[in-house]
Amino acid sequence: MRYLFLIFVFSFFINESTLAQHKVNLPKAFSRSVNEKTAPFFSLSEGQTEDLLEGEVISQGKVDSPTEEIQQMMLFVSGIHPRNCTRAMRKLSLYENYHNYMDFIKKSSYDEKTQKFSFVVDHTLLPFPMVVGFKIPRITGQGHYPFTFEDGFLKDLKGTVIVQEVGKFCLLGLKADWKGPDSKIPDLVFSTFVQTVGKLGLEHLIRVSIY
C-alpha cells in the first residue's frame, strides 16, 4: 500500500502549476447551486463550499471497522473544472487513452458493450504490474453515472460520478462506498490513503483535460 501512495503522489504533482493557472474563482452566489448538486451524495461544510468556489479540489474519506472481520470505506471527492462539461469530458471520456494521460498507466482499454474499463498500473516502485478493472458508462456530458469495481482489492465497491454544469464551468465529483473483508490496513492509514489519492487524482484529471 505504501508503494501505491508514493506512485500517486509522485505522478499527480507533476505540472501542478498548470492547474493553478486555470483555477476557477466563483462568487459566493454560486454556493447554493454547488450545494444543491452535491447534496444527494454529500453534505458540504461551509469551508468545503468556499474551497470549491476558489478552485480547490476537496476530498473527504472515512474508513472504520464495525467488526474485527469487516472494514468499510466512504469517499467523496469534488472539484470545479474551468471548462464546461462537454469540453471537459471530450478528453476524460476517452478511457482507452488514459495510458497517455498518466505515466504509471501502461495499458488502458474500454469495452463499449460491457462498459468494462481496465488498465495496467506499473512503476519502478511497484513490485509487479497491477491490473485494475471496473464497470462504468462512457461519460460525455452532464449526469450521474454509477460505477462498480468487479474485482481486485476493493471488489464490490459501488459509486457515482457526478458531472454537472455550474455556470459556464463543470462540477466534477465522485462518491464511493465499500464494505468488505478486513484489509489488514489500519483504518487511519487506509482513510488517509484514499482521501489523498482522491484529491490528487481529480486534480490531475482536471489538469490534463484543460486543453
Image: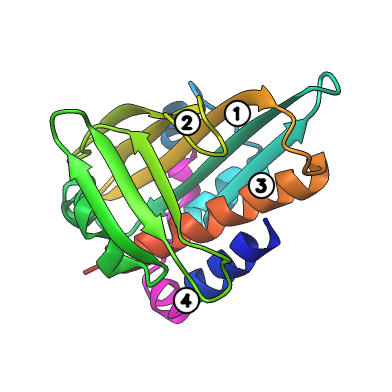
Q: Disc 4 and disc 3: Cα gap in Å?
A: 23 Å
Task: Check whether the beta carbons of the residues at disc 1 and disc 2 lie within 8 A of each other.
Answer: yes
As rendered, which of 197 and 37 lies closer to the eye?
197
Q: Which residues are magenta?
A: 14-31
Which amino acid type is marked by label 1? Answer: Ser
Q: Position of residue 93 (x, y in %)?
A: 21, 48
Residue position marked by numbered label 4 in the rendering: 16
Between tags 4 and 3, which lies in front? 4
What's the CA distance linking mark 3 and mark 2? 14 Å
Q: Nearer the viewer, mark 4 or mark 2?
A: 4
Name the disc covering residue 47, or none.
3
Query: What residue is at 41 percent from the left and 50 percent from the top?
Result: 131
Image quarter in which the N terminus is found: bottom right
Camera-nearest label, 3 or 2: 2
Residue 154, horizontal then vertical, whole percent? 56, 35
**Dot 2 crowding, Cα within 10 Å, few <14, some 14–19, many 20+:** many
**Residue 38 got which mark?**
2
